[in-house]
Image (cartoon, rainbow, N blue to C red):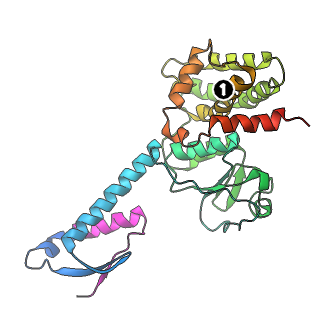
Amino acid sequence: MASLKVSYRSCSNTVSSRLTFLRDHSAPFCLSSLCKKVEVTQNGFPNTTISLPKLQLQALGKARATVLLSAKMAAGTVNEVLPPSLDSSSEPPPVFYGTTRLYISYICPYAQRVWIIRNCKGLQDKIKLVPIDLENRPAWYKEKVYSANKVPSLEHNNEVRGESLDLIKYIDSHFEGPSLFPHDPDKKEFAEELLSYTDTFNRAVISSFKGDGNEADAAFDYIEAALSKFEDGPFFLGRFSLVDIAYAPFIERFHPFFLDVKKYDIIAGRPKLADWMKEMDKNDAYKQTKGEPKELVEVLKKRFLAQP
């Protein structure tokens, strides 16, 4: 009998079609009188001899593993090995070569927004992370990828898009996975209001880094009030949404910064904000994107408090 070559490098759709072939033909091949052994070439194990029923079990196991992996990705429970940041000495990836890429920086809160939604929707195997070293960024990034020379940017369908709030909406609507934008008219309107407020919030907080903090107090009070609007959950819209993704990277930085520099706890007297932060820390998809608090504080100090 000719060797049956089986590759397990194929995608899940190919595995599924192979399972259909085995299921549709299981009766004639698995009769005891015809259940002969065949030579199967597997990756790294050439000419390994196994029976077809064993092959069927292996294929079933592979398909089940694929389903479980996809479920874990969607739940954010898969800890991926993060690639190193690319600097000026790096070679450019083959742009517009069919791979969807998300260009980020591990220290950028705007890029973190898009990284979070990628994880929340279980797209780790669909959107490849390409981290950029912003302090020594490669020239090819501006020349060949994104002329604005900022992160984040998304390479998809032969186009490169930027701006973090636009990108989290784009990924939510153009990729598989649970929708993170509300359909309820009241929540949808409030979501747009909160997304529009993000830049105002960030400016107010950052402007207080060297001042007395009054503007920061007002900004955090606004967040506390916003978190009190809906009672069907601890998040801005009750349930977890794009709004939580938009604010999380910044509050993640502001909290330890104010504790360290101002000796001021932003959650003191703000129970809704405190509960929101606790709930966010239960989200594995978000937790995988978080930085070390000390490092985040040092980045903010260097950028906003360094002496000229």
Q: Is residue 206 left or right of residue 37?
A: right
As drawn, which residue projects farthest toward the left? 33
Q: Secondary structure at mark 1?
A: helix
Image position, residue 165 (x, y; %): 68, 40
Q: Residue at x 57, y 43 (%)?
A: 117
Residue 20 seen from this side: yes
* Tag 1 residue: 255
* Front-lying residue, 59 or 217: 217
Residue located 78% across and 18% down the image: 213
Q: Tell me if mark 1 has few (under 14), some (14-19) or many (20+) residues whose alpha carbon lies within 10 angstroms of its own.
A: some
Residue shown at 68% from the left, 37% from the top: 296
Q: Extreme right residue here?
A: 308
Q: Quadrant of the N terminus?
A: bottom left
Left or right, residue 155 beside residue 124 = right
The reply, left or right, for residue 81 in relation to residue 69 is right
Image quarter of residue 101 = bottom right
In the image, which residues are magenta?
A: 2-23
- Give the position of the C terminus as an image quadrant: top right
Q: Does 232 appear in magenta?
A: no
Residue 3 on the magenta segment: yes
